[in-house]
Image (tube, helix red, strand yellow):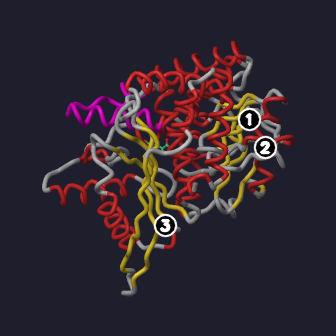
Amino acid sequence: MIWEESSLFKNAVKQLDRAAAIMNLDPNVLTRLHTPKRALIVSVPVRMDDGHIEVFEGYRVHHNMSLGPAKGGIRYHPDVNLSEVSGLAMLMTFKCSLMSLPLGGAKGGIRVDPGRLSRTELQRMTRRYTTEIMPFIGPEKDVPAPDVGTNAQVMAWIVDTYSQIKGYSVPGVVTGKPIEIGGSLGRVEATGRGVVYTLIEAAKFKNMPLDERTTVVIQGFGNVGSAAAKKISKIGCKVVAVSDVSGGIYNKNGLDLDHLNDFLAKNKVLKGYPEAEFVTNAELLELPCDILIAAAMEGQITEANANNIKAKIIAEGANGPTTDNADEILFDRGVHVIPDILANAGGVTVSYFEWVQGLQQLFWSEKEVNNKLWDIMSNTYGKVQNIAIDKKCSMRTAALISSVDHLSKAMLLRGFFP
Ligand code: GLU
């Protein structure tokens, strides 16, 4: 089938199959989870600023809705395609179930380089995409959120477009909104913060100190990577290298994040930062360090570099950064990998908090949000760690076992229709 083509989708299926074999999953449930529930492909015509029209391809995929409305981000990136979005939707199903959220899995995206579009073009594209996926989304059906290449402003345009067409305000149609229109405090930093929460638990397990002796390398310095960098350096660890599309920067004595952020505000990209040496994105992954946070894109840690990675703990801030073959190499080498559906689940967890706050029209303090996030992340980490010890499997397989066990019970209770 067409949605099976990407390596991300194939990887997600392999991970599922491995967990299913260990847990003796009902074969009917396994078959059902192998493919999404439904997928929508849309054309998104946009009048560009110079008057001509460009047509972009957009998608929204629902993987599973047994636990509740579908949930997952919208990605604007030139590599977006139906199969990638389908694989990411599958990962959202597993992520929401793992965190015991009453939500299913979805993902959407447009095949576009958003950096090439002006603000007005981006707004027109977002509004048209919203109208095209209107039948798929809604607070009780499917609730999108930011992902790679989208942000709170894009969510605000979606809320406005959806509300204009409905004739009344529907802020609950997305999460990750600006605070002013019903967003949650702590949502922007939630994914990066959650990554660090899982690292705190992993460090305890590995008896690794988290202080000035601990070196951290971060691939990707976008929303997830930069928030994780801020939080982990606040704890006292030394961030020695970070990267973005322009490449990586490395200073073995530690990077001054305030200085780096000032530089980025002016220069937009990391390349040219004077207080560090330049490294390629590939070199960055192999730098000496205790912790590696993979917060860029999928398929970064492969069988070509898995043997050269020096980190003792890897936290997957991105979705699908490690290929299946690399996973096996890392497991055999004793590298502790905190899988994506656990490490980066802070984002969707605070999305859930945002959705709940909006439904009640009762908003929580940032401290309340962060405390609740900590409870869910640390409890889930503990649950996964225990399964990994018990079954002598990787943290990824353990996370899938926990997730699919919960999900399969819901699927079997509901039964198959008709
Ligand atoms: N895009 C994020 C993820 O991959 C967040 C999704 C959400 O908040 O719905 O988990």
Query: Which sits in the foreground, 109 or 151?
Result: 109
Residues shaded magenta: 347-371
CA distance separating discs 1 and 3: 33 Å
Secondary element at tag 3: helix
- Which residue is at 31% across, 65% downward? 127
> Residue beneath label 2, please?
252
> Residue beneath label 3, please?
114
Where is residue 329? Give x, y as percent: 82, 36
Q: Does the magenta stretch include residue 355?
A: yes
Where is residue 196? Give x, y as percent: 58, 31
Left or right position of 323 against 99: right
Query: Which sits in the foreground, 79 or 201?
Result: 79
Outermost residue toward the bottom in this view: 51
Callout 2, which amino acid?
Lys
Quarter placement of the C terminus: top left
Q: Does the residue labelled 3 lie within 8 Å of ligand 1?
A: no
